Structure formats: structure tokens, C-alpha cells
Amino acid sequence: MTKKHIGMLTLALLLMVSGCTPSLDDKTEVIQNTEEEETKSVIIPSLQLDETYYRTLLPYEESASRGLVVSNLSSKYDMKEVENGLLRISQNEFSPEKYLFQEGQYLDTSTLKDWLARSNQEEGGLNPSDVGLTGEEKAKKAPVYITHIVEQNYLEKVDNKVSLSGISIGLALNSTYYYEKEKYGAIYEEKLTQAQIEENGKRIAEEVVTRLRKMDGLADIPIVVGLFKQNSRNAVVPGTYFTYSTAAAGKNVSDWKAIDEEYVLFPTADSQEKYRDLDTVFRGFKQDVETYFSNYTSIIGTGYFKDKQLQKLTVTIPIQFYGTAEVIGFTQHLAGLVKNLPAMNIEVQVNSIDGAEALLVKKAGDEEPYVHIYTQ
């Protein structure tokens, strides 16, 4: 690694530290109003690392339903994207320059478990009743549509106080319903159509907003609701949000806006069919890596597309090298390959069984990639 890159890394670390742990000169202490009309002192970091990042109140408060995402979503990829995608949607309505972020404080674990149940299991269940239906009949007539609800709160600072000014809700919807024909038997799956997912997602969204409006302090708060289509259990890329709506103060959702986002795995038949040029570039990159070092497991690329345009390509390279010199040599070779790729936002992660070994990042407008080799 060059001295230039070491210097860049040092600066980046300083920014991260100063952003995440503000000094006495880098914070603003204010009063937060809570839903119980109580007040407490909180800190607003003065430094915003990036225009797409929200500043977060300190001390950090976890969601009232934290932990449910692990049990409610079957894919680790969906667990991350259901929250990150909602953050992107929220930026359309709640600017990071104006609003502060806080994890959801209104929907607690008990409430969510009640809402995510079937209507015959819990009074507030949002999923259809399965009374008298067999496993296969449930799949056809009454599948589970919604499996998780994500809540995010957005606050504004006025004078010396911060208070809730907006809520974002993400509804995680099944694209595949899994069931057993008999207890402890084989697992079968039923694909849900896009029409089924959208119709029931919008129906559930209206009911969720209606219930939120009845909670203390939420009658006149703008509420953004996004519909997230989960991927299948065995997928190695996440699902995405496909539509969202904003319920203005005192109103319910309407005027849904379509979202065209997609995660595509490279290299596959799907990537070759949808994005042939990029697929060809990736296959060439993969071949160049193999020419220099063949001692690896596999090279996987995940492309994030918005409106059919590549936003970022993340490449993961698992390796089996054990020598530091070998890792350095491999990373230097990768840096040359990344430098010669067409203009795009790309991140290459080199990992071994011991953890992260190297990171290479190149933005579309950069001439050379940023390179960091992790040391023991």
C-alpha cells in the first residue's frame, strides 16, 4: 500500500471517530419530547459524514422491537436490505440535512407479534385466517403475506428541542409461501404473484396507518410506508422495495409511487440476459483474477440497479492464502484490474476464513481505487 493510501485511511478513520464519538466541541445538547410528554437530554452530533447519512441522537436508542427481524425474515440479505431500503425511501420525504434519525419507538415486540399473526390467532392479526384449511389449502387460499414491520422515526430540531416529525414503515411481504402438507413432513412452496403481493400489501398498509393514527402523538405525523418484496430462502441477493406512499398529516396512504430497484448476481444466466455488457466485463475480470491466482473459492458480484442503471457493484473474493506477502501481491494485482474497469462504483472485498484481508473501492469518477490491506 502506498503512503498516499495510508494517509487516506488515517483521515477516513479520524472522520469516522469524530462522527461516531463527538467531542465536547462537536455536539449539541438538546431536549427531546417523548410520546409520554416527558423530556430528556439528548446529544446531536455536529458532524455529518455524508449527505446521505442521517445524524443520530445520542445516547442511541434501540428499536422497541429490536431482534424480531432475525426471526421474521428468512434471509440474512433481506434482514439488511429491509432497513437500508427504507432509509433510501425516507430520504425522498425526510431530508438528511433537516431531519434526525432514531430507531422506531412506537411498535414494540408485543404489538408486532400481534399484528403479524393470522386474524384467527390474534385479534389484531393482519394475515388471513386459516381456520379449517389444510397446508396446501392455506397456500392457495390464505398464505401468510406479511412477515415483518420495520419502523424508523425522523425528528426535527426547533430552538433547543427535538420532536418527532415523521415515521417510515417498511412492510416485508412474502414472495414465496412455505408450508407442510402434513406435520413434520416435507416443505413445499407456493409462489405468490406480484398482483397478490401488491394488493394485499396496500391493504395491510392502510390498516397499519389507521392503527398508528390512533396512537398517542401520531394522529398528525406524516407516515411513509414502503412495500418490500422478500426474496426466496435460498437466494443470495436481497429482495427490494417496489412501491411506497406518504400519508400526509391526519391522512392515510394514497398515490403510490413505483420503485424500480433490483439486485443481480454476477456472473449468471440472469445477469447475462439482463445486463449483457456488464456481465461480459465481470466475466473478463474474473478470468484475469484466475490467470494470476487460482487459489480461491469463487468470485461473486452483486449489482445494485436503480431504474435499470448500475448504482454499485460489490465483488466478494474468498481466498485461501496464508502468507502476508501473498495477500499483498494479490491485492496489488486486483488494484490494477479494478483501475482498468469501465467507470462504475465498485467495491471489492477480499476475505479468508480469518476474516477481511483487503478492501478496494473505486467510484465512477476516480482514476485509481482506494486500497486497504488489513493487518494482524
Image (cartoon, rainbow, N blue to C red):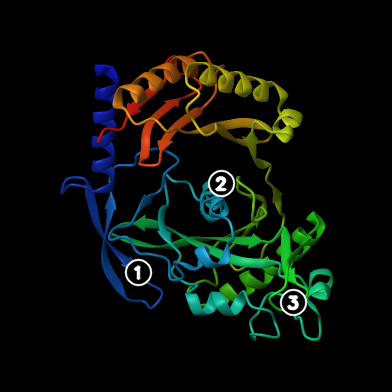
221 and 259: which one is in front?
259
283 and 125: which one is in front?
283
Q: CA distance from mark 3 to mark 1?
A: 37 Å
Give the label, 2 or 3, closer to the camera: 3
Residue 175 appears left or right of 214? right
Q: Are marks 2 and 1 in contact (CB under 8 Å)?
A: no
Q: Residue type at mark 3: give it.
A: Pro
Residue that badge 2 annotates: 92
Q: CA distance from mark 2 to mark 1?
A: 25 Å
In the picture, the disc for residue 128 is 3
The numbered mark, 3 or 1, whose residue comes first in the sequence reads 1
In the picture, the disc for residue 33 is 1
Q: Secondary structure at mark 3?
A: loop
Residue 147 sits in quarter: bottom right
Dot 1 surroundings within 10 Å: few (below 14), some, or many (20 or more)?
some
Q: Residue type at mark 2: give it.
A: Asn
Q: Is residue 251 visible?
A: no
Residue 132 appears left or right of 185? right
* Residue found 29% across the figure and 53% down from its top: 44
Q: Residue type at mark 1: give it.
A: Asn
